[in-house]
Image (tube, grey):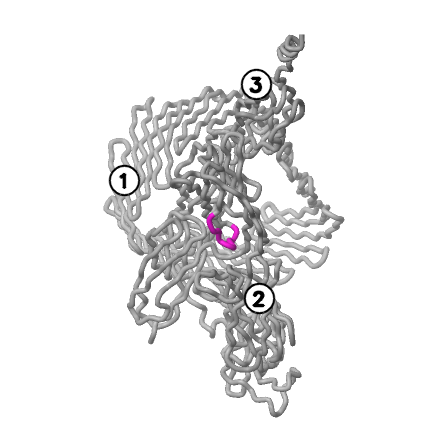
């Protein structure tokens, strides 16, 4: 009977119970209630689900963390108890995410091309097609424009800009997710365009010139054009803008002087001349046009405003008074007008008004003078999602105006209602479909404007191609337009067909492949069977250019030859001119640099001056004369003065800060005192023996404390080196700040010092590993993780070259850093690794996890993130003879595709040694002096090194 009862109990045991399907949100938690027999655990876990509960007995909840690497879709989660297995379908919804990184920007010379490398990353959990869009006024090329990215995958995109016709350009790059158009990222690239090479070296008072000469020969006719312009700063008070052009029809030019509280300008064209002036509250003009002279002016002081105008046709005078309350301004005025032909005098009144606030902007004018005139215009400050704008005008019986009300329905649809009133009234309704980042846009219009108006327009843009057209009917009849084109930074092609009252086919192309530029256009009128064509070809090299233009119409071909010369540059305004136009808007700081032996800050009779001392403010420097006197010319502002060019035992200890005012001289003596200092290096005393042994690494970016006669702190550089100077002689204690070390390190013993004038002492300061006792027995089959040595400190934006030795044949290895999870790839037998991006500041916890079935092993460490360069550049030797070879080595803290060193206009690409090391050579300049080498990673400057060429 007992055996039968036991068999019956086994047969009636609990079946494994769990939900059939659950939904898990990325970044959240998944809880699975289970009930079964014995120990219940997860036998198979989808990628991205991290078990938080290993197992439960009989009944309970299995908890999982849904990591960011969990991919969207439905995944099986296999559960097992003592008798059976059961599968739970885990649904992870799609979460779109896009990350875009762009460089900060660069400078270039007009006419050149500038390239930027962008990085686009799929931060979502599903494969995505990311579309890129650029908004810039410069010709550009973006390659590629569409990226197919797996979750977590990043790709680089190349943006090339051609620098033409502007001083500065802001290119905004958008990246739109194909999974959800509302998800987008954007970055801004600022480009400074210099008009010519060397413009950045000119001073604040500089003049820029441009000389241009153009000649044309065609149809046995020679014509020319001459242009000259000069503009810039004559002084800090007056600016100049001038231009002169000589053409066959006559000379034309402009001249303007702009200053503080005044402006004077002259413009002259064949038959038209005008003089404008402004001085304080007065503005006036005089003009000669069509054989007649006219003049006018306005005087406004406080609320009163007087204006007048005199010409051969008559005169007009007005007097007004301004009333203002908040954003509302009203100007009632009276006006008198005299008409010469026929002779008549009228008087009237008027009212000008303006309303400005956060919601609305309105301007209007109402005047009664020989009839009523009225004008009102305005708009809401915000046009999205709802906006209004319009204007209306009435003049002696004629009323006209327009108004537009627009509303955004959602991210893709907008509609608007437009009312127009002129000779006829019109009412139009437009519905537009323009999805964010989508290639297709549609719009439709229906309404009346002197008759029925119907219209439909469509456009499709993809990877440089654009197709579009419009179809509809207006009061003049039906119309149709179709076009197709391709546009790149260097060339474009367009084919179009229009059918209104006539049918016309058009073909146009243009290209720019320096030094060649060309364009061509072909038009064919179907109804009149008429062909027209135009073309142009130009060659530009340096300041010279030549070209050929052609036109074909009505069976006649006309050719014109072109020649151009353009020279542009600049120079510093001569000092005599600067002084003649008011000089500089600067002030002065002057005084004596002396040795303050008694440290009281006041020059005594026995305290000598220090001739040759260099007083610096930023890059500006003044050398003290034989009496120790210096004089600095500075623009208004607050400055801190420093003193250099002294012996190592002398330094300016007091904080010398001044506030400079325009036109004033501030006396300031600089007391230099006898000081001491020290130099040292922080290292990791790995064996804790208190001595620096071979192979013990330096400890970069540790904070050093000095206490004694005074207290100081210093931050060690990337080699662990620190320097402290400008100290009072005396007894000190040198130690490490424990908060600046990793959690697995501790400060060594403090170092006592007795600092006296003389050579700088060299000090070694130790940090030690924290003593930890770890006892673990491993076999060859055990799953274990061992981290290889890590860099002690990395700057934000670097990449951590992570390497981990993993034993036991894991099925999956990943790393967790900064709240993100990264998969590690096998590099060789038992070795896994990856480059992990480092962000933020402070101490980051790193964890490497290996998994095999239900078994799990992990290892952890801490990484310190502090600001610092992303690479270092070493130039050997640093002191060279002219033309001697310089060996260059760049050590990177993040990978880069293009590594180069720039010396002025010279660019030297470095060759890859490994992922983080690049080397190259260059020849030293032949001119003696100090030079700065700049290290660029993918177009961004990250570090500099200096070399000096011997005399």
Which residue is located at x 38 percent, y 23 percent?
502
Q: Is residue 342 left or right of residue 683?
A: right
Secondary structure of residue under mark 3: strand
Give the class, few, some or many, for how many residues have Cα within 10 Å of label 1's Cα (few <14, many ≥20).
some
Secondary structure of residue under mark 2: strand
Give the class, few, some or many, for how many residues have Cα within 10 Å of label 3's Cα (few <14, many ≥20).
some
If the image is split into quadrants, where does the C terminus sit? bottom left
Q: Is residue 450 left or right of residue 559?
A: right
The residue tagged 1 is 550
Secondary structure of residue under mark 1: strand
Q: Is residue 835 left or right of residue 23?
A: left
2 or 1: tag closer to the N-terminus: 1
Q: Nearer the viewer, residue 681 or 656?
A: 681
Marking on residue 86: 3
Magenta-colored span: 788-796
- Can residue 74 be spotted in the picture? no
Which residue is located at x 62 percent, y 15 percent?
15
Q: Is residue 98 magenta?
A: no
């Amino acid at each position: 009977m007992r055996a039968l009862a036991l068999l019956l109990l086994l047969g009636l045991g609990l079946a494994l119970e769990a939900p059939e399907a659950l939904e898990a949100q990325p970044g959240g938690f998944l809880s699975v209630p289970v009930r079964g027999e014995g120990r219940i655990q997860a036998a198979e876990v989808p990628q991205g689900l991290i078990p938080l509960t290993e197992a439960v007995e009989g009944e309970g909840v299995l908890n999982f963390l849904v990591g960011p690497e969990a991919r969207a879709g439905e995944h099986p989660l296999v559960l097992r108890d003592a008798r059976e297995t059961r599968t739970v379908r885990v649904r992870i919804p799609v979460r779109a995410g896009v990350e875009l990184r762009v460089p900060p920007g660069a400078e270039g010379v007009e006419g050149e091309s500038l390239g930027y490398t962008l990085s686009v990353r799929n931060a979502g959990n599903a494969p995505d097609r990311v579309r890129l869009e650029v908004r810039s006024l410069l010709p550009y090329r973006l390659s590629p424009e569409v990226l197919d990215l797996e979750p977590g995958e990043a790709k680089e995109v190349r943006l090339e800009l051609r620098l033409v016709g502007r001083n500065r350009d802001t290119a905004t790059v958008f990246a739109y997710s194909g999974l959800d158009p509302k998800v987008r990222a954007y970055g801004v690239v600022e480009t400074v365009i210099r008009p010519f090479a060397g413009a950045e070296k000119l001073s604040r008072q500089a003049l820029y010139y441009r000389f241009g000469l153009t000649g044309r020969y065609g149809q046995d006719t020679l014509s020319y054009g001459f242009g000259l312009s000069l503009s810039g700063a004559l002084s800090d008070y007056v600016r100049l803008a001038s231009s002169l052009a000589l053409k066959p029809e006559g000379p034309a030019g402009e001249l303007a002087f702009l200053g503080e509280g005044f402006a004077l300008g002259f413009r002259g064209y064949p038959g038209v001349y005008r003089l404008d002036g402004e001085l304080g509250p007065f503005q006036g003009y005089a003009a000669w046009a069509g054989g007649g002279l006219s003049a006018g002016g306005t005087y406004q002081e406080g609320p009163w405003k007087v204006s007048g105008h005199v010409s051969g046709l008559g005169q007009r005078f007005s007097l007004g008074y301004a009333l203002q309350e908040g954003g509302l301004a009203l100007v009632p005025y009276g006006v008198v007008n005299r008409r010469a032909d026929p002779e008549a005098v009228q008087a009237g009144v008027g009212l000008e008004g303006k309303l400005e606030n956060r919601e609305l902007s309105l301007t209007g004018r109402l005047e009664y003078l020989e009839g009523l005139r009225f004008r009102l215009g305005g708009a809401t400050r915000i046009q999205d999602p709802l906006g209004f704008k319009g204007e209306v005008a009435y003049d002696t019986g004629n009323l006209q105006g327009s108004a537009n009300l627009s509303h955004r329905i959602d991210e893709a649809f907008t509609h608007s209602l437009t009312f127009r009133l002129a000779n006829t009234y019109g009412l139009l309704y437009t519905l537009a479909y323009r999805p964010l980042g989508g290639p297709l846009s549609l719009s439709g219009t229906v309404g009346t404007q002197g008759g029925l108006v119907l219209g439909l327009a469509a456009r499709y843009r993809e990877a440089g191609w654009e197709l579009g057209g419009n179809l509809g009917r207006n009061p003049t009849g039906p119309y149709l337009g179709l076009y197709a084109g391709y546009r790149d930074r260097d060339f474009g092609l367009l084919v179009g067909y229009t059918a209104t009252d006539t049918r016309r086919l058009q073909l146009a192309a243009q290209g720019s492949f320096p030094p060649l530029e060309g364009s061509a256009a072909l038009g064919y009128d179907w109804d009149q069977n008429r062909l027209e064509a135009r073309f142009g070809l130009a060659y530009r090299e340096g300041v010279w250019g030549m070209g050929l233009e052609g036109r074909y119409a009505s069976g006649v071909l006309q050719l014109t030859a072109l020649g151009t010369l353009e020279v542009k540059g600049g120079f510093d305004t001569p000092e005599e001119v600067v002084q003649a136009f008011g000089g500089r808007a600067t002030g002065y700081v002057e005084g004596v640099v002396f040795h303050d032996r008694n440290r009281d800050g006041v020059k005594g009779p026995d305290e000598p001056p220090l001739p040759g001392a260099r007083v610096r403010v930023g890059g500006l420097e003044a050398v003290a004369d034989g009496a120790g006197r210096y004089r600095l010319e500075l623009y208004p502002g607050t400055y801190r003065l420093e003193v250099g060019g002294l012996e190592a035992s002398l330094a300016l200890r007091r904080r010398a800060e001044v506030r400079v005012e325009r036109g004033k001289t501030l006396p300031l003596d600089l007391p230099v005192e006898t000081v001491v200092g020290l130099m040292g290096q922080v290292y990791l005393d790995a064996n804790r023996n208190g001595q620096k042994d071979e192979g013990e690494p330096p400890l970069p970016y540790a904070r050093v404390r000095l206490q004694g006669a005074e207290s100081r702190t210093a931050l060690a550089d990337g080699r662990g080196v620190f320097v402290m100077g400008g100290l009072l002689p005396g007894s000190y204690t040198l130690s490490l700040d424990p908060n600046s070390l990793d959690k697995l390190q501790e400060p060594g013993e403090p170092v006592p010092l007795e600092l006296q004038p003389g050579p700088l002492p060299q000090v070694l300061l130790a940090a030690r590993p924290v003593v930890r006792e770890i006892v673990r027995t491993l076999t060859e089959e055990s799953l274990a993780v061992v981290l290889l040595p890590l860099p002690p400190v990395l700057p934000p934006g670097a990449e951590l070259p992570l390497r981990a030795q993993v034993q036991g044949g894991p099925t999956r290895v990943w790393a967790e850093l900064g709240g993100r999870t990264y998969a590690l790839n096998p590099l060789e037998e038992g070795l896994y690794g990856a480059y992990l991006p480092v962000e933020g500041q402070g101490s980051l916890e790193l964890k490497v996890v290996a998994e095999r079935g239900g078994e799990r092993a992990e290892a952890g460490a801490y990484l310190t993130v502090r600001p610092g360069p992303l690479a270092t550049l070493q130039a050997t030797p640093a002191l060279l003879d002219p033309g001697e070879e310089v060996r260059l080595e760049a050590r990177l803290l993040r990978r880069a595709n293009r590594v180069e060193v720039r010396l002025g206009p010279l660019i030297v690409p470095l060759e890859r040694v490994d992922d983080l090391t690049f080397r190259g050579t260059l020849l030293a300049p032949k001119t003696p002096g100090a030079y700065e080498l700049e290290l660029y990673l993918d177009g961004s400057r990250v570090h500099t090194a200096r070399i000096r060429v011997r005399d």
